Image: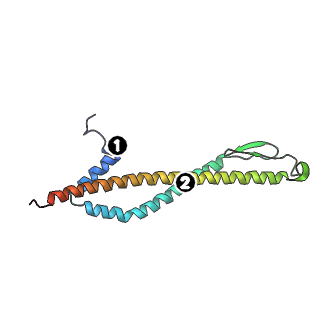
Amino acid sequence: MTQTMRNPESDSFAYIETLLESLAVLGKLGSALDIVAQRLPGEIFALVETTLDEVAERAEYGRRGSVVVAGGTTSRSDGVYIFTHGDGGHGISGGFLSASSLRLAALESSAKRVDHETLKDFFWTVYSKLDAITQGLRVVYEVSNRIGSVSRSMSAPNF
């Protein structure tokens, strides 16, 4: 495949470089960088909010997919086994714990595990997205500096 037929967006970094060079030729690079700097905080806020909604939706879908069966059976819910006692809530040998308190402890443990997995999903997703953004911003920084140094060296007087 020839270079002209290739999709310019297939290599994000080369695409950013091409856009920045085009803006520099048009004399608009400075204002474009100012706009990026102004919009960045709002865009990052929107990215975190969107990610929060995505993760919450995934967590809700995961909760709907898990079923807890009570009454003397064993079921699986999000990787945690919940054992229930079939004696109708009477005390366990020696009267230390009732079956209902065992079920409650198991459900609380399951809920904490689900919350932990949800937070882990959220932080890894946000981290991945912010990592991609910082890589793109680094390209903008490097290319802008290169363009600026080339234009400064071309406009410098020769003595």
Q: Quadrant of the N terminus?
A: top left
Q: Name the residue under label 1.
A: 10
Residue located 36% across and 55% down the image: 137
Residue furthest out toward the front? 159
Is 30 situated above or below 69?
Answer: below
Q: Do the residues labelled 2 and 1 touch (CB within 8 Å)?
A: no
Please state the horizontal and vertical placement of residue 98, each as a whole percent of the image: 85, 53
The number of callouts visible is: 2
Front disc: 2 or 1: 2
Front residue of 135/69: it is 135
Amino acid type indicated by mark 1:
Ser
What is the crowding at mark 2: few (fewer than 14 residues within 10 Å), some, or many (at least 20)? many
95 with respect to 19 (left or right): right
Amino acid type indicated by mark 2:
Phe
Residue located 15% across and 57% down the image: 154
Q: Name the residue under label 2.
A: 122
Residue furthest out toward the right? 94
Q: In which quarter of the image is the C terminus?
A: bottom left
Q: Along the polypeptide, which appears first: circle 2 or circle 1?
A: 1
Please state the horizontal and vertical placement of residue 8, each as a whole percent of the image: 30, 44
56 with respect to 34 (left or right): right
Label ID, residue 66: none
Q: Can residue 57 be seen in this snapshot?
A: no
Please state the horizontal and vertical placement of residue 33, each as a whole percent of the image: 30, 61
Is 44 situated above or below 72?
Answer: below
Residue located 42% across and 64% down the image: 41
